[in-house]
Amino acid sequence: MELRVDGWSVGARFSVSHFIPFHNKCGRLHGHTYAVGCAFKCDVSAEDDMVIDLISVKEVLRELCDELDHHVLVPTENANSTVDVDGDEVRVETHGKRYVFPREDVKLLPISATTAERLADWFIDRMLDRIELPAGITRVELGIEEGQGQGAWTFRDFS
Ligand SMILES: [Zn+2]
């Protein structure tokens, strides 16, 4: 069986600015509204009428979305960018460009790029830190959709 949460429908969304270093078009500062969905593959035993409470899952997704919402996402682990936090400023040099942002407007993420792929991996690990996974779940999937019908889905398997 599979239990699914659709991020667009349940309001698990965040709007951010970002740039993808070295990408021709996406290397320019721009924004998206993302939705975060997830799915749980599970075995339903004779005793389990409900495997996981999706209300608490939705709360965790929305909490994480709120942490990112209305920020500039800056990856700190990009090999070709430098990120300096200096007082109330964040300075980023990448691909011959120099950005200076107010510190309070920035969410620093320990990933190599803020692509949907990397954001999905960042998100699934934080979601799994915050939910208690019941027995019977064999796979957790999480998707970052950067528009309806386009996104990156990642997964973690459990035995
Ligand atoms: Zn983008």
Image (cartoon, rainbow, N blue to C red):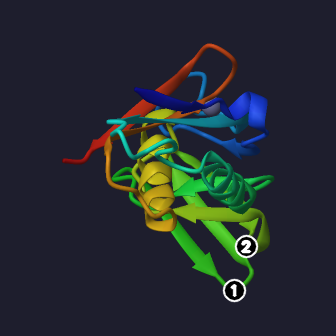
SS class, disc 1: loop
In which quarter of the view is residue 16 placed? top right
Q: Position of residue 148 (x, y in %)?
A: 69, 17
Which quarter of the rendered picture does the N terminus lie within? top left
In which quarter of the view is residue 133 placed? bottom left
Viewer-proximal residue among 109 and 129: 129
**88 relative to 34, above or below:** below
Residue depicted at 51% across the width and 49% down the height: 52
Residue depicted at 58% across the width and 56% down the height: 74
Residue 9 disc label? none
Determine crowd level at label 2: few under 14, some 14-19, many 20+ residues with C-alpha closer than 10 A: some
Marked residue nearer the N-terminal end (1 or 2): 1
Ligand 1 within 8 angstroms of badge 2 C-beta: no
Left or right for 16, reference 80: right
| Amino acid at dot 1 | Gly
| Amino acid at dot 2 | Arg
Question: Would you say residue 47 is visible in this rendering?
Answer: yes
Residue 103 disc label? 2
Image quarter where ligand 1 lies: top right
Residue at label 1? 87
